[in-house]
Image: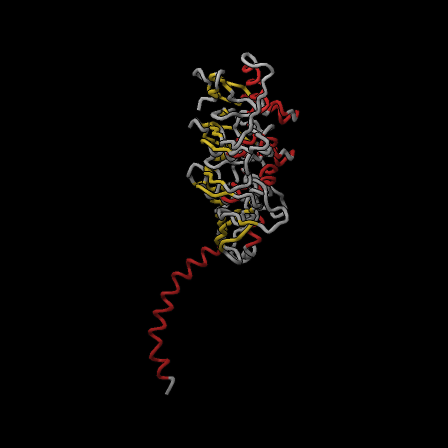
Amino acid sequence: MTGSLNLPLAGRVFVRGLTVEQATATLASVYAQYLRRPTVTISLLQRRPIQIGVAGEVRSPGTYTVPINAETSQLPRVTQMLETAGGITQIADLRQVQIRRPQPTGGEQVINVNLWELLQTGNLAFDATLRDGDTIFVPETSVNLAEAPLLNNTSFSGDVNLPVNVSIVGEIYRPGTYTVTGSPARATEAGLPGQNQSLSSVGGPPTVTRAIQVAGGIKPLANIRQVQVKRLTRSAQEQVFEVDLWALLQDGDARQDAVLQSGDTIVIPAVSALDPATASQLGSASFAPDEIQVNVVGEVIQPGVVQLSPNTPLNQAILAAGGFDNRRARKGNVQLIRLNVDGTVSRQEIDVDFTEGLSDANNPALRDSDVIIVSPTGWSTFSDTVSDVVQPLENIFSIFTLPFRFLRLF
C-alpha cells in the first residue's frame, strides 16, 4: 500500500491522504499536460479500514482497526481514538499529545496536538484528523488536583466510575488490597469494612475516602493532611502525590478526594499527637469508623467491652459500663492501658472527673482497644484477702460438723 495510482500516460501519482475531490483535481492537473481540458471522474467503491496505534497514558493501548464510511470518507479524530482506547488516564498530558505519521520516503512526521486547548475553547482545530498508519502517543505528567475534575469528565476520559483494585496501608484499621467502587460506604465498627449504603447518592468514582471507608476507617492518630497516593505510569515509573483530607473536612475542597486508578497505593502516615478539637472532628468524619471497642475491667457495675463513638472521653466509657461499684471501687483514679503505634504499651493514671469535658490530663479521648482498669479500694482488697483466708477454714469446719448434722436427722 503505497498510496499511489499507476495510470496510462501519467504513470505513478501519489494520492495518499487526499479526499476524492482533491485526488480528482490532482489527476486533472497531471493529465492537463497531455490532454486538452481533461475530464477526470473518481468513484470510491469501498473504503478500506485504516489502522491507528494508540500508546502512552490510555487505559487500553494498542492498534485499532477503524472502518471508514465510504459515503462521507470521514476519518477519525484524535479524541475519537482516545475514547476507542478506553480513555485517558489521570496522569495524561493533554498539552503535548503527539501524532506520529509515517512518511512515504521513510521516517516519520511528529505532529503536536494540544487537547487542553480543545477542552478550554472547543476549537476543533485542536482535534486533528488522523490517517492510516498514524500512532497517537499520550505522554505522562504529574497529577494536578485542580485540573483532575475536568479531565475525569471529558468524553475521552473513559468510565471513571468503574471499580478499581487498590492497596491501602498505614494508619488504617484493616490495611490490605481492596476492590473499591463508587458506592458510598461507611465503616461501622473500627476495623470492619464499610458496607455500601442504600442512598440516593449512590454512584460516582472510587475515591481516596471511599477506599478508607472500605478498609475500616482511619485510626485516631492518622495524619490526614499528608495522605500519599502512589501511582505507576505506563512506563513503569512511580509517581507520588499528596492529598489533604483536612482541607476536605474544613473547607469542603472536594478536589482533595482524588479519584483512584487500579494499581494505586494509599499511604496514611501517623502524627505523634492530636489536640482534642482536631480529634473530635476526625471522629465525626465520614471516613472514620462509627464505633470503637473499649474494655472496662475491675470495679464497675457491668465490666467488659463497650461500644463507643470514636474519641469518646474516658468518663463516658465508665458510665457506659454502668458506673463505679460504689461499695468497692476506688473512685479517685483509674488506669488507662493503651497500645501505641510503635507497638509499645503505655499506662496512665487518670484522676476521674465526671464534670470535666474532653481533656488529655483528666478525661482523654479514647481509642479503639483501650483498656480502663478500675481498682478496688483498700478496704475491698483487705476484705477479699480475709475472705480468701477464711473460706478454706469454713470448708474444714463444715467437714467436722457434718456427722452432727447427720445425727440430727434421727
- Residue 255: x, y in percent? 60, 32
Residue extending farthest to the bottom is 410
Q: Is residue 285 left or right of residue 398?
A: right
Q: Is residue 316 left or right of residue 60?
A: right
Q: Quadrant of the C terminus?
A: bottom left
Please state which of residues 145 and 307 is positioned toward the viewer in this rendering: 145
Please state which of residues 295 and 109 is positioned toward the viewer in this rendering: 109
Residue at 63%, 46% in the rendered image:
201
Residue at 38%, 61% in the rendered image:
389
- Residue 71: x, y in percent? 58, 33
Q: Quadrant of the N terminus?
A: top left
Asked if one can make out residue 325 in the rendered structure from this viewpoint, the answer is: yes
Tally the numbered discs: 0
* Above or below for 151 versus 95: below
Please state which of residues 45 and 384 is positioned toward the viewer in this rendering: 45
- Residue 5: x, y in percent? 48, 21
Q: Is residue 331 left or right of residue 106?
A: right
State the colouring used for the structure image: secondary structure
* Above or below for 183 versus 101: below
* Above or below for 263 versus 198: above
Residue at 42%, 62% in the rendered image:
387
- Residue 341 falls in which quadrant of the image? top left
Asked if one can make out residue 226 in the rendered structure from this viewpoint, the answer is: no
Residue extending farthest to the front is 36
Please state which of residues 389 and 259 is positioned toward the viewer in this rendering: 259
- Residue 20: x, y in percent? 57, 25
